[in-house]
Image (spheres, helix red, strand yellow):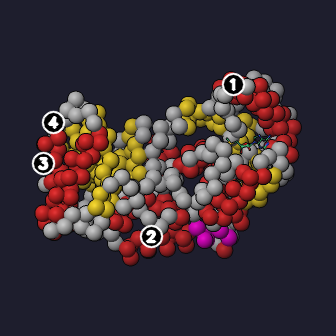
């Protein structure tokens, strides 16, 4: 296959993030197409797929459409898949994994469907080359993805392989860490651009602070990763990839200081010393620790630089028996902290618990809808003018 041949690219994401993916795709200069709850389409070639993998912050996977066909049985599926010239795409020395999502009356077992697709791919390669590639469940090499809905099958190459949200910097997760793609979307929702201070009390393992630092320094998140699905295909153009990486690096270095812009300080604090230790190490792995000041303290003791800026908090919102009373006190204190210490800033609280958010006791100026592991969440925005009104949200 010619890597310059265009096809549909489907960018997948978690529920609630598709508008952020669209914004990113358009900022990269692409025209976005149709979307649904967890995916956005556009047209592009394999080079566009590489570029998307390098730059997207809020996506899960970049899928490149190989073939679309009508199908009513596993045998028909096999027949359609074996027709593709897989030998031009995958070397027999490679390792292939197949993932299927099935919503059709023709079959009810997605594992069986994946097996059928895998058989067709390796049978074809064995027939043409005399040896068959290994296959299995690992998703860090060639990943082929099938969606079979009613009578329609769509067969994609998953050019990302492992999810893009697994950036690789979180060597030390802590309590209830946010997924990196969700944290990036939260920071994007605040409109943060690095020109003013960003404060993350309750930073946990530091995901919000680290994603903010990556955004402020215009550092492509894909620079942190050395392995993608597309690298395991025969048409992987390593020099072109290296050039894309170099361009992204140059852009981020220029942003880091020499060209006149140094992001304002990011401050990340947590009451738990182990969380701060994890956050510090994760920031080092992500290459942004020089942009973040860490401290161990109660959130209310976090030092807020004078002037204007953004505060983002992600308190626990668990519903375990006995937790509510303690959390109510914490949420009430968050409201007090905003009122008493953060005048001039814009405050944000990310929570999945509407009852607790009411206890904050301040008027929200906006609410952004998100999902965290299927729990409906809100990012609540508070304009903290001097003399902010003490009113229920
Ligand atoms: C839901 S976790 C934050 C997870 C974080 N967003 C991440 O991605 O890792 C909440 C954090 O609040 C911290 N915390 C709880 N009570 C606190 C307090 N009074 N002051 C400061 N931090 C507190 C906990 O130690 C925990 O790390």
Instruction: Please name the residue that numbered disc 2 is placed on.
Output: 244
Callout 4 secondary element:
loop
Is 18 placed left or right of 196 in the picture?
A: left
Pointer 2 with pointer 3, Cβ within 8 A: no
Quarter of the image with the N terminus is bottom left
> Is 253 contained in the magenta span?
yes
Please state which of the two labelled residues, at mark 2 or mark 1, is closer to the viewer: 1
Which is more N-terminal, label 1 or label 4?
A: 4
Label 4 CB less than 8 angstroms from ligand 1:
no
Disc 3/disc 4 C-alpha distance (Å): 11 Å
Q: Residues within 10 Å of mark 1 (few under 14, many from 20)?
A: few
Where is residue 258 shown, x and y percent of the image?
66, 74
Please state which of the two labelled residues, at mark 3 or mark 1, is closer to the viewer: 1
Label 2 CB less than 8 angstroms from ligand 1:
no
Instruction: Please name the residue that numbered disc 1 is placed on.
Output: 321
Pointer 3 with pointer 4, Cβ within 8 A: no
Label 3 CB less than 8 angstroms from ligand 1:
no
The answer to which quarter of the image holds residue 389 is top right
Which is more N-terminal, label 2 or label 4?
A: 4
- Range of residues picked out in magenta: 252-257
Disc 4/disc 2 C-alpha distance (Å): 42 Å
User: Which residue shows up at 51% across the image and 45% down it?
Assistant: 20
User: Which residue shows up at 15% across the image and 59% down it?
Assistant: 124
Disc 4/disc 1 C-alpha distance (Å): 49 Å
The answer to which quarter of the image holds residue 357 is top right
Disc 2/disc 1 C-alpha distance (Å): 51 Å
Disc 2/disc 3 C-alpha distance (Å): 38 Å
Mark identifier at residue 72: 4
Disc 3/disc 1 C-alpha distance (Å): 55 Å
Please state which of the two labelled residues, at mark 4 or mark 2, is closer to the viewer: 4
Please state which of the two labelled residues, at mark 2 or mark 3, is closer to the viewer: 3
Where is residue 125 shown, x and y percent of the image?
18, 63
């Amino acid at each position: 296959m010619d890597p310059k041949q265009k096809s549909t690219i489907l960018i997948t994401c978690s529920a609630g993030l598709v508008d952020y993916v669209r914004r990113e795709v358009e900022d990269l200069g692409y025209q976005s197409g149709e979307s649904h709850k967890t995916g956005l389409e556009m047209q592009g070639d394999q080079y566009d797929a590489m570029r998307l993998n390098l730059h997207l912050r809020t996506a899960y996977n970049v899928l490149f459409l190989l073939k679309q066909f009508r199908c009513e049985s596993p045998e028909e599926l096999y027949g359609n898949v074996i027709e593709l010239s897989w030998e031009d795409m995958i070397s027999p020395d490679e390792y292939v994994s197949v993932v299927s999502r099935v919503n059709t009356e023709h079959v009810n077992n997605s594992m069986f469907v994946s097996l059928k697709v895998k058989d067709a791919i390796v049978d074809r390669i064995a027939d043409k080359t005399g040896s068959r590639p290994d296959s299995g469940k690992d998703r860090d090499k060639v990943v082929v993805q099938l969606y079979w809905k009613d009578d329609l099958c769509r067969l994609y190459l998953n050019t990302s392989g492992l999810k893009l949200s697994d950036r690789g910097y979180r060597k030390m997760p802590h309590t209830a860490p946010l997924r990196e793609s969700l944290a990036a979307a939260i920071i994007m929702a605040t409109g943060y651009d690095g020109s003013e201070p960003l404060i993350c009390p309750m930073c946990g393992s530091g995901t919000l602070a680290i994603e903010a630092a990556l955004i402020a320094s215009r550092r492509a998140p894909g620079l942190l990763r050395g392995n993608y699905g597309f690298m395991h295909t025969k048409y992987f153009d390593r020099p072109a990839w290296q050039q894309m990486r170099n361009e992204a690096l140059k852009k981020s270095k220029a942003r880091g200081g020499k060209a006149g812009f140094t992001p304002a300080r990011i401050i990340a604090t947590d009451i738990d010393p182990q969380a701060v230790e994890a956050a510090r190490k994760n920031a080092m792995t992500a290459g942004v620790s020089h942009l973040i000041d860490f401290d161990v303290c109660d959130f209310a003791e976090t030092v807020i630089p004078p002037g204007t800026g953004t505060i983002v908090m992600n308190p626990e919102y668990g519903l375990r028996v006995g937790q509510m009373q303690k959390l109510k006190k914490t949420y009430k204190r968050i409201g007090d902290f905003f009122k008493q210490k953060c005048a001039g800033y814009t405050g944000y609280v990310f929570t999945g618990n509407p009852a607790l958010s009411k206890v904050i006791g301040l008027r929200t100026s906006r609410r952004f809808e998100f999902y965290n592991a299927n729990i409906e969440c809100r990012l609540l925005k508070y304009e903290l003018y001097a003399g902010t009104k003490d009113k229920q949200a």
